[in-house]
Amino acid sequence: QVQLVESGGGLVQAGGSLRLSCAPSGSIFSINVMGWYRQAPGKQRELVATITSGGTSNYADSVKGRFTISRDSDKKTVHLQMNSLKPEDTAVYYCNAELPFGIHFWGQGTQVTVSS
């Protein structure tokens, strides 16, 4: 059973930075799109950023200019560099991988807490 393993969450002061990483624990032949989503308490899960296998990225308006998504050359590891963090960025961040035929895998989530 393939799983997505996330790392890099934690507690940071407002204005600080964190870097999240995510990679599959097993063998996956091909991943089309990788992305990060987040869910704050009492809110729905929302898209943060995605990146295609060709390198095209997409960001939520709330993080544009502050967050950067990237993929390693193996195309199966994704990172989210988060700068200028705000208290409203506090949430559980989930990694997602979209495989061919619409198959999705999710990570277990990593907590990001930004103190004011």
Image (cartoon, rainbow, N blue to C red):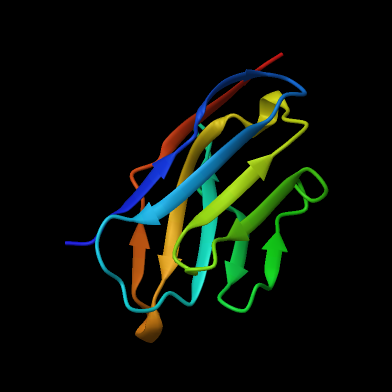
Residue at the (77%, 23%) spot, across then down: 15
Q: Is residue 53 above or below residue 80?
A: below
2 sits left or right of 93 in the view: left
Farthest left residue? 1
Residue 100 vs 92, above or below: the answer is below
39 on left or right of 55 = left
- Residue 1 lies in quadrant: bottom left
Q: Residue furthest front?
A: 73
- Kindly identify the residue that appears in the image at 62 percent across and 58 percent down: 70
Horizontal and vertical percent position of residue 72: 54, 61
**Considering only vertical position in the picture, is 115 above or below 41?**
above
Where residue 100 appears, as percent x and y from the top left, is: 39, 83
Nearer to us in this view, 27 or 61: 27
Q: How many marks?
A: 0
- The residue lying at 60 percent from left, 63 percent from top is 50
- Place of residue 88 in the rendered image (x, y in percent of width and height, measured from the top left): 68, 30
Q: Position of residue 93 (x, y in %)?
A: 49, 41
Image-based side of 32 in relation to 56, left or right: left
Q: Residue furthest top?
A: 116
Quadrant holding the C terminus: top right
Q: Residue furthest right?
A: 65
Q: Is residue 69 above or below residue 108?
A: below
Name the residue: 65% across, 43% down.
81
